[in-house]
């Protein structure tokens, strides 16, 4: 839908669906009997459709609107807002636990109804924000795209620079015209579309299966199973969410300086070690004859520390990165479809994890944390050998990196690490050489763009020497 309607309408529709779903959910009453529960489930399902639209579209829109040097920081801001929302949800829900008697239903009704405020905010504010210039150019609305690009460039804007940027973007977009975006996702060749989609989806999959929402959703329950007491567990859950929000701040400074790839590695290793601490402490309790003695209480506190260390690492690394990465590494022809699939991977994995975690915890408390720790360490070599660095690269440069890796038979992460940053003109020339633009640009360079191996001898030697 996003390719036909644009980014802004999908965000608007998503917000509207969330408002409608929330109204249906919170207006369900016990007097309706089973129909009340049915109404609640229907409302939550409708809200979920809206949330799916927004989470699949907003990262794409942000990435297409952002300059390469600021893109990571801006999408990281989205991750920080997620954490702030989680913190608000925890403390508001904690406050509503004091509702009793005739207003007891406020314990769930008010927190869910609060979604409407934020959805209305998006719905109103999006009217004053521009459409993606890349989408506008794809729809041949060049004048509107020029206006947006000038506004984004600010004082640096001049007609010559903007016109050149438009020409290069149109070259890249035209290369993918007359293609079915969803079907194209499952092709490889020079574009490496399927591989790129899998990389983005793998980040979303591992974000969930390394234990983030097992810890975040169930933090108060986990603290209670560690015999912290119900009221104290609720308070600790709120503090846990507050720590989560605070430690998203380093991501603003690190995501461009340290890079996506290094932060992925830091996050996976740190999370795995944190869960090993929790696992070890709980295993020690399980091995004792008396799990209520003083030493067992100290070990349970150690398990809590492990959870807090986990959320610190997650907050400034793995929270944001799987949302930044898919829009960055997927080409314009498949970006919407590929990001939708990666987002689907996130929510499907999220669903699986939050369904099996309570069962796993009840069966083997420390075994659950061992599973998540191992999933983190399994992810580390996958990141190292398959994830290319995207920091500071334009979206079009990533097309060159994947095509170059395919043509030269080199690991894509090595190409990304060794290839210098390209100007817009250099990106265009490399794209032509690698055959990304097809035969229609051959006459500009005298090179058969469909066959990069058949480059002119000097160019071929130069490319080989560079490799």
Image: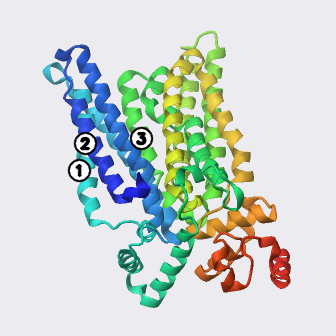
Query: Residue under circle 1?
Result: 120
Q: Position of residue 85 (x, y in %)?
A: 35, 45
Q: Is mark 1 on a helix, strand or loop?
A: helix
Q: Return the x and y of residue 394 as percentages of the image width and height.
A: 57, 70
Who comes first in sequence, dot 3 or dot 1?
1
Foreground residue among 272 and 357: 357
Q: Residues within 10 Å of mark 3 (few under 14, many from 20)?
A: many
> Is disc 1 surrounded by few (<14), some (14 to 19) or many (20+) residues within 10 Å?
some
Residue receiving disc 3: 241
- Percent across and percent down for residue 207 are 56, 42
- Residue 310 - label: none
Residue nearer the viewer, 222 or 348? 348
Q: Nearer the viewer, residue 294 or 21?
A: 21
Residue 422 shows in the view: no
User: Which quarter of the rendering shows the C terminus?
Assistant: bottom right
State the image coordinates of residue 382 (x, y, percent, origin top left).
Answer: 71, 46
| Tag of residue 19 | 2
Dot 2, crowdedness within 10 Å: few (<14), some or many (≥20)? many
Viewer-side label of 3, 1: 1
The answer to whether residue 313 is above or below residue 32 is: below
Residue at image location 70% in from the left, 65% down from the top: 403
Observer-nearest of 29 and 429: 429
State the CA–CA distance, disc 3 to disc 1: 24 Å
- Residue furthest left in the image: 102
* Residue beneath the point at 40% across and 27% down: 233
* Residue for point 46% across, 85% down: 163
* Side (left or right) of 295 relative to 227: right
């Amino acid at each position: 839908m996003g390719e036909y309607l644009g980014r802004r309408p999908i965000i608007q529709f998503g917000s509207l669906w969330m408002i409608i779903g929330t109204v249906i959910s919170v207006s369900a009453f016990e007097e309706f009997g089973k129909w009340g529960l049915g109404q609640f489930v229907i409302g939550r399902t409708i809200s979920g459709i809206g949330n799916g639209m927004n989470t699949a579209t907003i990262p794409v829109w942000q990435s297409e609107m952002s300059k390469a040097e600021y893109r990571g920081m801006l999408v990281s801001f989205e991750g920080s807002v997620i954490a702030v929302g989680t913190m608000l949800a925890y403390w508001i829900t904690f406050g509503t636990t004091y509702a009793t008697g005739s207003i007891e239903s406020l314990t769930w009704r008010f927190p869910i109804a609060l979604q409407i405020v934020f959805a209305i905010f998006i719905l109103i504010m999006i009217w004053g924000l521009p459409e993606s210039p890349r989408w506008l150019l794809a729809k041949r609305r060049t004048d509107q795209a020029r206006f947006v690009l000038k506004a984004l460039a600010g004082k640096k804007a001049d007609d010559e620079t903007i016109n050149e940027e438009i020409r290069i973007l149109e070259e890249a977009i035209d290369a993918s015209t007359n293609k079915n975006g969803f079907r194209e996702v499952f092709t490889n060749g020079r574009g490496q579309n399927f591989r790129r989609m899998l990389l983005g989806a793998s980040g979303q999959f591992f974000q969930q299966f390394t234990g983030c929402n097992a810890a975040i959703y169930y933090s108060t329950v986990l603290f209670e199973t560690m015999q912290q007491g119900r009221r104290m567990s609720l308070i600790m859950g709120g503090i846990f969410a507050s720590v989560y929000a605070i430690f998203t701040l380093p991501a603003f400074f690190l995501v461009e300086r340290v890079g996506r790839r290094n932060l992925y590695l830091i996050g996976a290793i740190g999370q795995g070690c944190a869960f090993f601490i929790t696992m070890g402490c709980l295993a020690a309790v399980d091995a004792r004859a008396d799990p209520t003695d003083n030493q067992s209480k100290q070990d349970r506190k150690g398990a809590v520390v492990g959870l807090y260390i986990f959320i610190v690492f997650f907050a400034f690394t793995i929270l944001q990165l799987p949302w930044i990465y898919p829009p960055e590494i997927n080409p314009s022809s498949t970006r919407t479809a590929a990001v939708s699939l990666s987002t689907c991977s996130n929510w499907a994995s999220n669903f699986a994890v939050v369904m099996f975690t309570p069962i796993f915890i009840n069966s083997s408390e420390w075994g659950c944390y061992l599973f998540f720790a191992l999933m983190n360490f399994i992810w580390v070599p996958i990141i190292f050998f398959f994830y290319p660095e995207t920091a500071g690269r334009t979206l079009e440069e990533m097309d060159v990196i994947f095509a170059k890796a395919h043509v030269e038979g080199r690991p894509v992460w090595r190409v990304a690490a060794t290839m210098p940053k390209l100007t817009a003109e250099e990106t265009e020339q490399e794209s032509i050489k690698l055959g990304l633009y097809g035969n229609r640009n051959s006459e500009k360079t005298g090179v058969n763009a469909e066959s990069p191996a058949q480059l002119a001898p000097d160019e071929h030697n130069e490319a080989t020497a560079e490799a």
